[in-house]
Image (spheres, grey):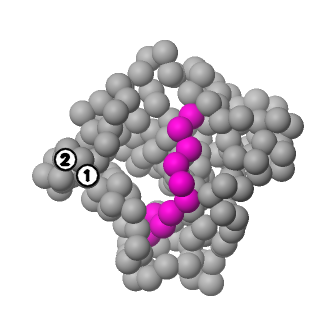
Amino acid sequence: MARDAPRGSEWVWDKPGPLLTHPWLCSPAELNALQNELGPYGLVVLGFPSNQFGKQEPGQNSEILPALKYVRPGGGFVPNFQLFQKGDVNGAKEQKVYTFLKVGAVVAGGLGGKCPNLFWEPLRNHDIKWNFEKFLVGPDGVPVMRWYHRANIAVSPPAAGTSCSRG
């Protein structure tokens, strides 16, 4: 179980309050809005890009921030949340933080994605299903809840022109 997971230098939780971690929530702009709204209450949004779902994040790590600023969503966008380097969230090379999260916040259900669009092995039922899957981690570092990629967990209604129906 997650409570028995390694602590210390293997897991770095250097921010106070609950953590929301995900490959992406719904859109980078919605992540900024969530951080603005709940940051004063201790929420810290963390972004972990991955190229394992339909090869939708093919660029180098150095290209991610400029792509957000000028292309998607563009318009000079700058994330107000911590954005980590791109990595694997599933399979033999998955980042240890995702192994920890998936064991601690299991969601019932099958694999869910279309196999031609999933680029890792082995495929497991508890894998991240698609971009925008969310995890809520308590201030003690223990996973509390997990949401599928289509779940809208916005506190306020999304701004006009935004949508959480990705996939």
Report which quarter residue 149 is drawn in: bottom right
Looking at the image, residue 154 sits to the left or right of residue 165; the answer is left
Identify the residue at image location x=24%, y=33%.
140
Q: Position of residue 52 (x, y in %)?
A: 57, 70
Q: Secondary structure at mark 1?
A: helix
Label 2 crowd bin: few (<14), some (14–19), many (20+), radius 10 Å: few
| Quarter of the figure with the N terminus | bottom left
Looking at the image, residue 92 sits to the left or right of residue 132; the answer is left
Identify the residue at image location x=29%, y=56%.
100
Report the front residue among 133 and 91. 91
| Quarter of the figure with the C terminus | bottom right
Q: Is residue 73 visible?
A: no
Which numbered disc covers residue 121?
Answer: none
Q: Position of residue 89 (x, y in %)?
A: 46, 64
Q: What is the distance, in whole Å, between disc 1 and disc 2 at their CAs?
A: 6 Å
Q: Position of residue 2 (x, y in %)?
A: 21, 52
Q: Secondary structure at mark 2?
A: loop
Which numbered disc covers residue 10?
Answer: 1
Cβ atoms at labels 1 and 2 below 8 Å apart: yes
Judged by its main secondary structure, the magenta piece is: loop
Whether 79 is drawn above or below 63: the answer is above
Looking at the image, residue 76 sits to the left or right of residue 117; the answer is right
Which numbered disc covers residue 7?
Answer: 2
Q: Is residue 160 visible?
A: yes
Whether 98 is drawn above or below 28: the answer is below
Label 1 crowd bin: few (<14), some (14–19), many (20+), radius 10 Å: few
For the record, the magenta segment spans 81-90
The residue type indicated by label 2 comes to Arg
Q: Position of residue 18 (x, y in %)?
A: 37, 31
Report the front residue among 1 and 19. 19
The residue type indicated by label 1 comes to Glu
